[in-house]
Structure formats: structure tokens, C-alpha cells
Image (cartoon, rainbow, N blue to C red):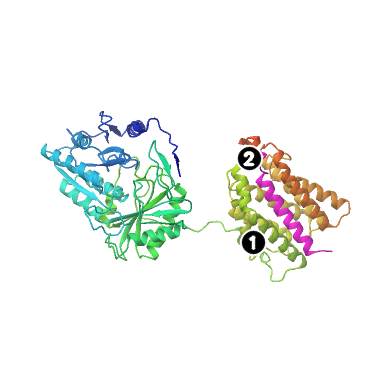
Amino acid sequence: MAFQGKKLINNPNDVVTEFIEGLAETYPGVQYLDGFPEVKVVLRADVSSATYDKVAVISGGGSGHEPAHAGFVGEGMLTAAICGEVFASPQVDSILAGIRAVTGPKGCILIVKNYTGDRLNFGLAAEQAKSEGYKVETVIVGDDCALPPPRGIAGRRGLAGTILVHKVAGAAAASGLSLDEVAAEAKCASEMVGTMGVALSVCTLPGQVTSDRLGPGKMELGLGIHGEPGAAVVDLQPVEVVVSYVLKQILSPETNYVPITRGNRVVLMVNGLGATPVMELMIAAGKAVPQLQLEHGLAVDRVYTGSFMTSLDMAGFSISIMKADEAILQWLDAATKAPFWPAGIDGNRPPAKIPVQLPLNHLMNNDESIGRPLQLSKQGQILEVCIEAAANAVIDLRDSLNEWDSKVGDGDCGSTMYRGATAILEDMKKYYPLNDAVETVNEIGSSVRRVMGGTSGIIYNIFCKAAHAQLKANSQSAVTSKQWAEALEASIAAVSKYGGASAGYRTLLDALIPASAVLQERLNAGDDPFTAFVLSSEAALAGAESTRHMQAQAGRSTYVSTDILASVPDPGAMAAAAWYRAAALAIKNKEPS
């Protein structure tokens, strides 16, 4: 099945020229030749062939891989980039126009990705330029490691490793080296780098339909940057597994695509293919570094993570590994004004993590009694059952909470509550002084604060701290049911005070306020505490369900239409009702009397 792709464009035929116009308006260091639509050349604004006294570094190819190649035009990197139409090699006349515009007496080097069209067009342009008296050298980059060694003349495809070759050549040229020396540096770099890509989706060309040929739950290994088929279509795997596979393919001694062996120093590039969030790219980078170090015995000297050579809106990433030495690192660290080369990467890498300066709450407390007791009292047993039931209720509700929150919020309520609940269960095994209910409430707040982000985390931390303060001020040894009720009331008041919400605002308070009222009412009427707790939990559940009929006045739900709000209850209220009711039923079952 296919459908029309959504693009923020005008005429699909004008996307390349309009991209170039926007790039030049954004970055004053670049200009373009006034030859649209045939000639699409981006060049340094400070370079003219009449006055340029260094080797010009020129690259290019089909468009659709932005920021490559035009985004890497700048002092210390490319002198000019020749842009073809989307996924189509630039024409010979366009390449020649670029050569003539920036090439001075020291000549130019053409860095070309290994695709037949690019090789032919850049090759013919090079020969024509030589006949006009220009000094021209060409370096072909074929860094693809996904496919078996080719038997024909096509060779390995040029991928994101080309960007590292750009940087090496640009820095070498900027240092004043001769054309032969720059070409030698670039050729050496091209032979030291290997790349493999992984895609979760294919890309959509401007004005064309989107294909879903990969299908749900599938990924493609070794997909090309033009959407051409890769080595295999497989089931979607965790990124750690994917990274491991890719690294093994690149470093395979059987193919011997890159001359990298244990003990070598390397540079790592994790490159987004166009639609991959930075978060996912960083996760991949974070898994790749220790695998390179521990499994492959390599020293990782530099890590570049971002989108360097994309494939329009393809979801996925590629990994490039380049063998490094002091000379390569010097070129990579050299200053550049290319707008899309990452800043802040140069220099030796310090340890990725350092110790937290302030210890966690249970480690700060000098009272040796704080911690899980070896023997639980009757109250400690009840408290443990209560906490365990409440946490498990939240864990079981995760997917429903996320589904509701995806309609009225940011879709992460269940995941956030899940983190808090699992942390509570883990910490209870080691740190909670369950025989001391007051300090246990305080420790729950510490667990929540440590792992729950966003509004939910701070609200529940305030909730626990207010309850702890109330209990500590009014209880002696065992906490009475009336004191628990007062602590709940104090917690509600604190959340309302700092969060600004009250009854009817469509928040967790719409579950807790009626629960508190019924709990106080039934205790004052003389009901036994367990029955009162269960009845108040029914009120909590009813209050949470009633949020379907409320107009939100707090949180992200305030931006959602009434019709959508009416389709689901408030996730925060449902979470509160779930843990409250689970705790009540657990205590009732623990103490049937």
C-alpha cells in the first residue's frame, strides 16, 4: 500500500534551488552561482578563483542527502558543492562551473561518492577542466560495508564516511598543502573508513507516494542512501543488537573492508538518515562506544553523532568507523566554518560519567535504623503489602495510561508512573524502614524524586513530603487511621497549593479529594479503618471516572478540545485511583477482621 507523502514544499521540481536559496540566506559564509536551474553550485563567499591561493576541495552529488554536501561548504572543509536534482548526479556543466568559480593556481580535488552517475559526470568534468588548464585530482569514496565484496566493476557505494574524507581534505588544503599532498591525505582517509546503514522506513521523494514496502515491525540492513535495497529485511531489534551487528559487519576480517584490528585507534560517526530523533542517535552512539572498546579492543578517540548525510525522510541511521592516528585526528580537529560540521568534538575524550556529588536520601541519613529491618512488625507487614499492591497496580496500568495520555497529553503518563512504581518496589527491598511508617513515606518520596521526571514526579514528591511532615508532627510510634487520613488531607492541600489545581480541574486531585472526604466521613462515623479505606477507594475511582465530563484547567490537557477530553478519563486521576484502591483492597485482605 502507498499514499501521498506529506512535504513542506512548493513545486516538487524546485526543491533543490529553493533549498540552496534558503541555505545562502541563513549562512552568510556561503553563496551560490546565478545559473539556476541548470547550474546549482554552492561555494564559499570568501573564495574567488582569481585570488584563491590554496587547493580547492569540491564535492557534490544528488540532492536529498542534506546537509551533505552544501552544508559542509566553509573554510576548513569544502570550497564548493555541486548539487544535482534529488538522487540524481549533477550535470557536467554544473560541475565545470563550480571548478571554474573556485579553482586557483594550486588546483582542485574532486571528492566523489562511488556511484556510476557521479563517477561519469565528475570524471568528464575533470577531463574538460584539465583541457582548460586546471590542475585536477579525483578521489573516489566507497565506504559501504553492507554488501559482499563486489564481483563486477560497480564497487562499494559511497556513504556517510565521505563526510570524514571531506573534513580531512578540507583541513589539509587549508593548511597550505599541495594538490598532490591533499589528494594523498584524502585517498588515505577514504581507505580507512567503513560504513553500514540500517533503515526502519524507506524515503519519500518530493511529489511522489510513500511506500511501506518494509512493512510493520521490519527493518532493512544495508539500505542505500537512495532507498536502494540492502542486504536483508529482518524483524525490528533493540538498538543494542542492531549496533552490534553493524559493527561486526564493518570490522569483519572476512571482508577486510577496513584495515582495523584490535588495539587500533578509531573515530566513530553515528549518522541519522533524515527522520531519526537525536535521542535515538545518541542511544546508538552510547551503545557503540563500549562495544568498540570491550568487544573489538579499539580505542575510540572521537565520536560524531548527528545527521550528516541523510536520505530525505528515511528513518534509520548509519555507522561509520575510521582508523585514526595523530595526523587524522589533527585534520578532524582543525577549525572549520562549515555550518553543519559539529562543534565541541575536538580534543581528547574525558570519562563519560562522573560520580554524583550529593548522595541519595537514604545514604545521607546518619540514623542507622533507616533501612529495611531484618524482621517486620505487624504494621511493617501491612505497609509492605500496601505498597507492593499500589505499585503493581500502576505497573499493570502503564499501557492504558499512555494510551489515554496520548489523546490528552504527551503520551508518557504510564511510562513515568511505571518508572516510579518499579523504583519503589526495588528500593523497598533495601532501604525502606517498613517498621517506621513515617520514614517509609519519606523514602517513597525519595524514590519518586530520583526516577520520575516531569510534572508527575514533582507532584508525587510534594505529596509524599507533605504526608511525611504531617505524620512526623503528630504521630508517636504506630500511625493511627485518623493520622493517615490527616496526612492524605495535608498532601492534597500541598499539591493544590503548589500545583494550582483543585476539585474539578481534571487532575489526580479529582480522585484524591473525594477519597479523602469519604475516608474522614466514615472514620468519624465509627466505621472500622479497613472498611473506611475501601469505601474511600471507591470514591477515588468514581472521581477519576468523572473527569471525562470535566473541562481541563491544568496541565497540557487545557489545550485539548472538549470532544477529545470526553473520550477518555484523566490519566493522572486514573493512576491515583488505581494505586489508592489497590492499597485499600490489599489492606482489607491482609486484615479481614
Counting from the top left corner in percent of width and height, residue 16 is at 33, 34
Q: Look at mark 2 in the image and give the residue it sits on.
A: 555
Residue 587's image quarter?
A: bottom right
The answer to whether residue 323 shows anywhere in this view is yes
Counting from the top left corner in percent of width and height, residue 319 is at 36, 54
On the rendered image, what quadrant is the C terminus found in? Answer: bottom right
The answer to whether residue 353 shows anywhere in this view is no
**In-image side of 487 versus 309 (left or right):** right
Main SS, magenta region, reads helix
Q: Residue furthest front?
A: 1
The 10 Å Cα crowd at callout 1, few under 14, some 14 to 19, many 20 or more, is many
Range drawn in magenta: 565-593
Q: Look at mark 1 in the image and give the residue it sits on.
A: 425
Q: Are marks 2 and 1 in contact (CB under 8 Å)?
A: no
**In-image side of 275 versus 265 (left or right):** right
Q: Residue furthest bottom?
A: 374
Identify residue type, mark 1.
Leu
Counting from the top left corner in percent of width and height, residue 167 is at 28, 47
